[in-house]
Amino acid sequence: MKIPENYQAVMPYLILEGAEQFSRFMQAVFDAKETHRTMRSDGTIMHAEVMTGGSTIMFAESGEQWGVNTAGLFIYVDDADARYKKALDNGAAVITPVADQDYGRSGGVKDPFGNTWWITSLNA
């Protein structure tokens, strides 16, 4: 099987209210880089992609044809506490506070677009 460069075998595809703002959230919180954007004639995002930590997330603005479709996402980061705080500073809501777990330091937030994020870093 051949997969295009910068793509993975499985990638989330989110349909959101506020796709433009989601791109800014990803850049501010997870240092994501937007790698692709196709616009509709009405000025909304038809298809866009961001890359963070070697993983691609595809997304689009919801509309009549495609309703909102959010996800639960687990993400490894360099510093769970710092990224968690950035998420809250950028409009996310607390699900669980950051705490030490058997698998690392982790906390849960819901972003302003309805996605749940489990932000985790490995214990030192």
Image (cartoon, grey):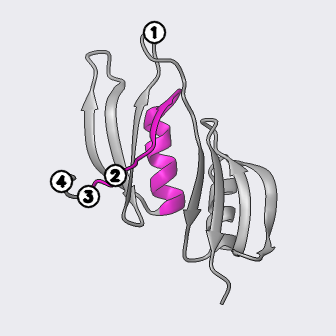
Sequence-first tag of 2 and 1: 2
Residue 13 appears in which quarter of the rendering?
Answer: top left
**Label at residue 64:** 1
Q: Position of residue 1 (x, y in %)?
A: 21, 53
Q: Which residues are magenta?
A: 6-30
Q: Residue furthest top?
A: 64
How many neighbours does mark 3 have within 10 angstroms: few (below 14), some (14-19), or many (20 or more)? few
Is the Cβ of the residue at disc 2 closer than 8 Å to that at disc 1? Answer: no
Q: Position of residue 95 (x, y in %)?
A: 79, 50
Amino acid type at mark 1: Glu
Amino acid type at mark 2: Ala
Can you tell which of label 1 and label 4 is closer to the viewer?
Answer: 4
**Label at residue 6:** 3
| C-alpha separation, residue under disc 1 versus residue under disc 4 | 34 Å
How many neighbours does mark 4 have within 10 angstroms: few (below 14), some (14-19), or many (20 or more)? few
Q: Position of residue 21 (x, y in %)?
A: 49, 39
Can you tell which of label 4 and label 3 is closer to the viewer?
Answer: 4
Name the residue located 26 percent from the left edge and 44 percent from the top edge.
Answer: 36
**Label at residue 9:** 2
Q: Residue furthest front?
A: 1
Amino acid type at mark 4: Lys
Which residue is more in the foreground, 69 or 48?
Answer: 69
User: Could you tell me which secondary element the residue under label 4 belongs to?
Assistant: loop
Residue on which disc 4 sits: 2
Q: Is 66 drawn above or below residue 28 in the view shown?
A: above
Asked whether 12 falls inside the magenta stretch, the response is yes
**Label at residue 45:** none
Q: Is 73 drawn above or below residue 48 in the view shown?
A: below
Can you tell which of label 2 and label 1 is closer to the viewer?
Answer: 2
How many neighbours does mark 1 have within 10 angstroms: few (below 14), some (14-19), or many (20 or more)? few
